[in-house]
Image (spheres, rainbow, N blue to C red):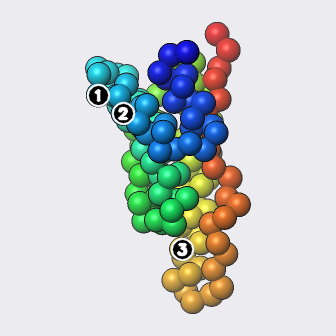
Amino acid sequence: MTPLERAIEQFNRGEYYQCHDTLEAIWMEAVEPDKTFYQGILQIAVACYHLERNNWRGAVMLLGEGIKKLREYEPEYRQIAVEELVRQSYELLMALQKIHSVSQRGEKEEGGDGLPLPTIRLVKP
């Protein structure tokens, strides 16, 4: 199993901290255009990690950064369905912003639990 395959499995199992460690090792050795691609996935993984720890600000910030980087690689890159990952990440970002907006207006806030987290799907060659 390659390090990228391991990172994808970790991401999809919700092991975001481990995924971060695996991707960071790949990212540090990579050159462009791969370097920015790996960083985008890494940022989304860390955003999910922040969300698990109720760090709304960190999750929102890193989701936005990761989405921005990965859009350059749509629809797919390195056999990853990037367009789908970006869409799922964007939907999560919008849901988080809606929850925060409701909270800011003083209305009853629905928790972030149960929000659909993004997954990485491979595209068959």
Assign the N terminus to one quadrant of the image.
Answer: top right
Measured Cα–Cα span from mark 1 to mark 3: 34 Å
Toward the viewer: 25 or 96? 25
Give the residue number, with chain letter if any, for mark 1.
Answer: 28
- Splitting the image into 4 quarters, where does residue 34 fall? top left
Q: Mark 2–mark 1 contact, CB under 8 Å? A: yes
Toward the viewer: 14 or 120? 14
Mark positioned earlier in the residue sequence (2 or 3): 2
Q: Is residue 29 above or below residue 109?
A: above
Toward the viewer: 110 or 104? 110
Residue 57 relative to residue 77: left or right: left
Measured Cα–Cα span from mark 2 to mark 1: 6 Å
Residue type pointed to by label 3:
His
Q: Mark 1–mark 3 contact, CB under 8 Å? A: no
Q: Which mark is residue 100?
A: 3
Q: Which mark is residue 24?
A: 2
Mark positioned earlier in the residue sequence (1 or 3): 1
SS for tag 1?
helix
- Image spot of residue 106 (x, y percent): 57, 89
Residue type pointed to by label 1:
Met
- Splitting the image into 4 quarters, where does residue 110 fall? bottom right
Q: Residue furthest right?
A: 114
Residue type pointed to by label 2:
Glu
Measured Cα–Cα span from mark 2 to mark 3: 30 Å
Assign the C terminus to one quadrant of the image.
Answer: top right
SS for tag 3?
helix
